[in-house]
Amino acid sequence: MVDDFPNTRKVIEYALSKIGEVEFLHANDGKEALEYFDDRKVDLLITDYNMPNMNGAELAKAVRSIKEYEFIPILMLTTEKDENKKLSAKEAGITAWIKKPFVTEEFISIVKRCMN
């Protein structure tokens, strides 16, 4: 889970705790998050778009370039509305674009679909 606002990460963690026991890795930006893609098991990446050091589209592109992670679901959870940024995220290989704030039940449904 990658977002430069700790409170957002807490909200996401709380929402996902409703689907069962889940282990979370937290990062403040894309650059920090890339450190987790070191052969450890990562099942899902949830990232914001706008972050310092490396944005969500750059992170998605970097993760997709790592063979072990090229097919994991990547969810872009963001307030961003710019169509060019949406396109860059799509081209980087995101699985879904989710608007903040989100409705918990809808968010959980998307996560479950992506995990299957």
Image (cartoon, rainbow, N blue to C red):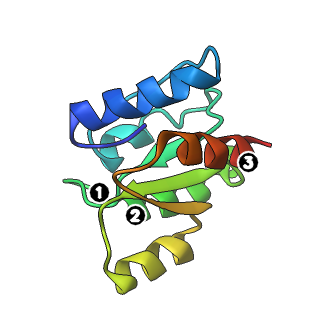
The percent coordinates of residue 4 (x first, y second) are 23, 43
Say which element carries label 1. loop
Looking at the rendered structure, which numbered label has been put on residue 54? Answer: 1
Residue on which the image places disc 3: 113
The percent coordinates of residue 110 (x first, y second) are 63, 49
Q: At 34% across and 51% down in the image, what residue appears? A: 101
The percent coordinates of residue 30 (x first, y second) are 34, 49
Amino acid type for the residue under numbered disc 2: Glu
Say which element carries label 3. helix
The percent coordinates of residue 77 (x first, y second) are 42, 54
Residue on which the image places disc 2: 58
Using a 10 Å C-alpha cutoff, classify the residue at mark 2 as few (fewer than 14 neighbours), some (14 to 19) or many (20 or more): some
Residue that sits furthest to the right in the current view: 116
Q: Contact (CB < 8 A) between labels 1 and 2?
A: yes
Q: Contact (CB < 8 A) between labels 1 and 3?
A: no
Amino acid type for the residue under numbered disc 1: Met
Q: Quadrant of residue 49?
A: bottom left
Q: At 56% across and 41% down in the image, what residue appears? A: 105
Which of the pair 86/111 is nearer the observer? 111
Q: At 37% across and 41% down in the image, what residue appears? A: 2
Looking at the rendered structure, which numbered label has been put on residue 32? Answer: none
